[in-house]
Image: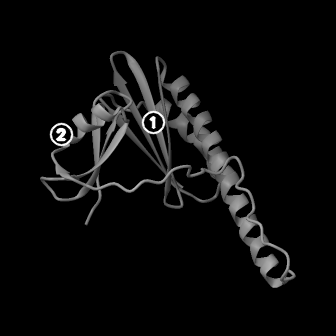
Amino acid sequence: MRIKFTGRHTPVPQAFQEHAEKRLEKLGRINQRIAGIHVVLAEERGRADVEITVDLDGTPVRSEVKGADPRASFDSALEKLERQIGKYKARWDNRIRRMRRAAADEEVEAPAEEAEEEPAAPEDEPQIVRSKTVGLKPMAPEEAALQMELLGHDFFLFRNAESNLVAVIYKRQSGGYGVLECEA
């Protein structure tokens, strides 16, 4: 497991790195599928923001905490991350169990007159409650931001007129907007 530290507007103190590495070793014991960890320490306006991103077999899991003390912010972000990884692991284990159960049920044939029932999705699984098809109009990101605000949404899907790529504009927690574009 590789750990990378990045400092934004501040160098990352050696004592902070040692504290973080010691605490992050625990994550490696909890879940062996962690490929890498990226810790970002940012100081802005006298505040220490800590962001931890874990690469869990290609799935990024991220936690961010803003606070006055870097170590306290790191510890809070790590606790948050441990809960998220626990939920992810539980979902993964449930999915594996359901797949094994389905495979075992296929081996044992059910009588023809019995109706097959779909197993109910566990409560911790994400449930899609609505699906919608949208037309993608070519527009500038600024126009997409205006459309998003007019609709009262936190994100908006559009085709970027400049690059002709499908893109999503979203509101950032720190203020402002972000744009994600899909590669062709």
Residue at x-position 56% and y-position 52%: 128
Question: Percent position (x, y) of residue 37?
Answer: 49, 48
Nearest the eye: 125 or 34 = 125
Disc 2 marks a residue whose amino acid type is Glu
Q: Between tags 2 and 1, which lies in front? A: 2
Work out whether 64 lies above or below 87: above
Of all residues, the one furthest to the left in this rendering is: 162
Work out whether 23 lies above or below 110: above
Circle 2: is it few (<14), some (14-19), or many (20+) Cα within 10 Å?
Answer: few
Residue 45: image quadrant is: top left
Work out whether 71 lies above or below 4: above
Disc 1 marks a residue whose amino acid type is Glu
Question: Percent position (x, y) of residue 77?
Answer: 54, 33
Question: Percent position (x, y) of residue 74?
Answer: 52, 30
Question: Percent position (x, y) of residue 79?
Answer: 62, 34
Work out whether 175 lies above or below 40: above
**Seen in the image, is 87 located left or right of residue 44?**
right
Nearest the eye: 120 or 116 = 116
Q: Which mark is residue 51?
A: 1
**Viewport quadrant of the C terminus:** bottom left
2 or 1: tag closer to the N-terminus? 1
Label 2: element kind: helix
**Seen in the image, is 62 located left or right of residue 169?**
right
Residue at x-position 51% and y-position 26%: 73
**Seen in the image, is 60 located left or right of residue 133?**
right
Location of mark 2 (residue): 143
Residue 133: image quadrant is: bottom left
